[in-house]
Amino acid sequence: MRALHAGDLVVVRDDGGVRVPLGVLTDRDIVLAVVSPDAAANKLYAGDVMSTPAVIANGADDIWLLAKRMRLHGVRRMPVVGEDGGLIGIVSLDDLLHAAANLLDELRLIAARQAHTEGKRRA
């Protein structure tokens, strides 16, 4: 994870060539497990500390549903699966914030454009 600058990994099971998400291992999961007073870091496996079961998003979910699911489950990242249940990506809180910022910017442009358009119609 350090070499790839990755804050999370999706742990999957191969189910006939389909990678089905089982859980998510985050840098925070690792830190909390390793700093535990009874932790033996050299004996920990991903399955011991990952968040499971994985909170899943479907490729067709809209961002409102994603945000609600993240809030309800208290997660910042969700694996995204296709119709076959196989992993197709991951969506993060940062992705949703970026989408929301783009929407707000577009709404701002609508308001600014309205005065310009009205001026042209009346001319």
Image (tube, rainbow, N blue to C red):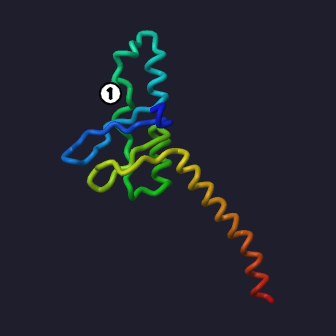
Rendered residue at 76%/78% (across/down): 116
Rendered residue at 28%/50% (across/down): 85
In the rendered image, residue 78, in percent from the top left (x then y), is placed at 42, 43
In the rendered image, residue 97, in percent from the top left (x then y), is placed at 58, 49
**Who is closer to the viewer here, 91 or 56?**
91
Q: Is residue 77 left or right of residue 14?
A: right
Residue with the most extreme bottom position: 123
Q: How many marks?
A: 1
Disc 1 crowd, CA 10 A, few/some/many (<14, 14-19, 20+): few
Is 37 rendered above or below residue 13? above
In the rendered image, residue 21, in percent from the top left (x then y), is placed at 32, 41
In the rendered image, residue 32, in percent from the top left (x then y), is placed at 47, 21
The secondary structure type at the circle numbered 1 is helix
| Residue 8 picture quarter | top left
Q: Quadrant of the C terminus?
A: bottom right
Rendered residue at 46%/52% (across/down): 65
Q: Is residue 115 left or right of residue 28?
A: right
Which residue is label 1 attached to?
47
Kind of residue at badge 1: Gly
Is 117 rendered above or below residue 103? below
Rendered residue at 40%/49% (across/down): 89
Q: Quadrant of the N terminus?
A: top left
Is 121 rendered above or below residue 67? below
